[in-house]
Amino acid sequence: MQNQVETLNRHIEFLRSLDTEEFYEKDEEEVRQFVQSTLQELVELGSQATHDLLELLQTEFTWSCFFAITIFRQTRDPQAVPPLINFLEKESDDSMANEEAMFALQDIGDPSIVPLIENLEALFENKKYNSYLVGALTGIIGLIPYEFMSKITKDFISRLSRYKGWFHIEDFTYNFVKQQRKEAIPLLRQILEMKGITGTEKRGLEDTIRALEDPEGYEKELKETVNELSQAAKQDSL
């Protein structure tokens, strides 16, 4: 036990040591390779490391914070769910850590669902939208997230005026694709026929419908677009 505590403390201090200008000048892949063995050993410690890792979430825009969240993606410890939600509630500009926290909640899976729904219901009641928390829930494949998505989408249709100015229906419904729920298509088409839908919302909904109707074709279309943009960027750099 004593050895495990010492090992844990050593690894936590090692992660903290990354929070210097020397490492901030490096990209993620380079730093990740440097810390890979430490990350793996912390993953192997499982829930024993959770408390100490959670303390690293207090310092945003740091490598120690980012990699602590990365570890939760693999340990999938339910104890991390409330702190990860709290982390995303702060709506900081640390987009890299925010995205990693969103994926961590997705990877933890079922234990994340009820706390996320409760949080989103409170946010929506106060007409606030958090795309990372939405993505965390809607990215968990299952009946309960799907039913919540359907419920809110139907409410959006019946009470559009309540959602104007703060809700992002194109973002909220996008993971119907990940849920593989083609039965959502009629709901999305119903929204497209509504007055007051913005151009951005319309384009997003149309993309979601295409992805649901023809996943392979849509994926191919995306890859072609990425390749075209990449080629254009290369030409511009010449």
Image (cartoon, rainbow, N blue to C red):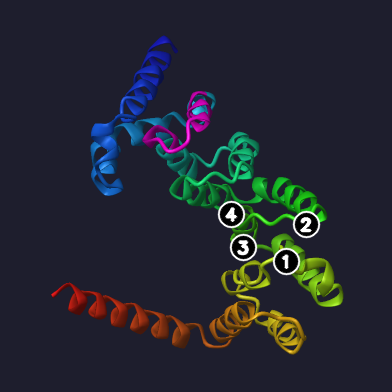
Point out the stretch of residues depicted in magenta: 52-65
Dot 2: element: loop
Q: How would you rate the neighbour count of disc 4 (Cα within 10 Å): few for under 14, some for 14-19, many for 20 or more?
A: many
Q: Is residue 122 left or right of residue 138?
A: right
Q: Residue at x 65, y 82 (%)?
A: 182
Residue type, label 1: Gly
Quick check: 209 above or below 122?
A: below
Residue 53 among those drawn in magenta: yes
Pointer 3 or 4: first along the chain = 4
Q: Mark 2 and mark 4: span between their CA atoms?
A: 16 Å
Q: Which type of secondary structure does the marked residue at label 4 adopt?
A: helix
* Mark 2 neighbour class, 10 Å CA radius: few under 14, some 14 to 19, many 20 or more: some
What whole-number distance in Å separates the C-alpha atoms at marks 3 and 4? 16 Å
Instruction: Give the spatial CA distance, label 1 vs label 3.
Output: 28 Å
Q: Which disc number belongs to residue 132?
A: 4
Q: Are marks 2 and 4 in contact (CB under 8 Å)?
A: no
Residue 78 placed where, x, y %?
Answer: 61, 38
Indicate whether 23 appears above or below 167.
above
Mark before the other along the chain sequence, 1 or 3: 3
Point 49% across, 40% down: residue? 72
For label 2, the residue is 127
Q: How many marks?
A: 4
Location of mark 3 (residue): 141
User: Disc 1 vs disc 2: Cβ atoms closer than 8 Å?
Assistant: yes
Residue type, label 4: Tyr
Residue at numbered disc 1 = 165
Secondary structure category for the residue under label 1: loop
Q: Quadrant of residue 124?
A: bottom right
Q: At numbered mark 3, what does the secondary structure look like: helix, strand or loop?
A: loop
Q: Is residue 167 magenta?
A: no
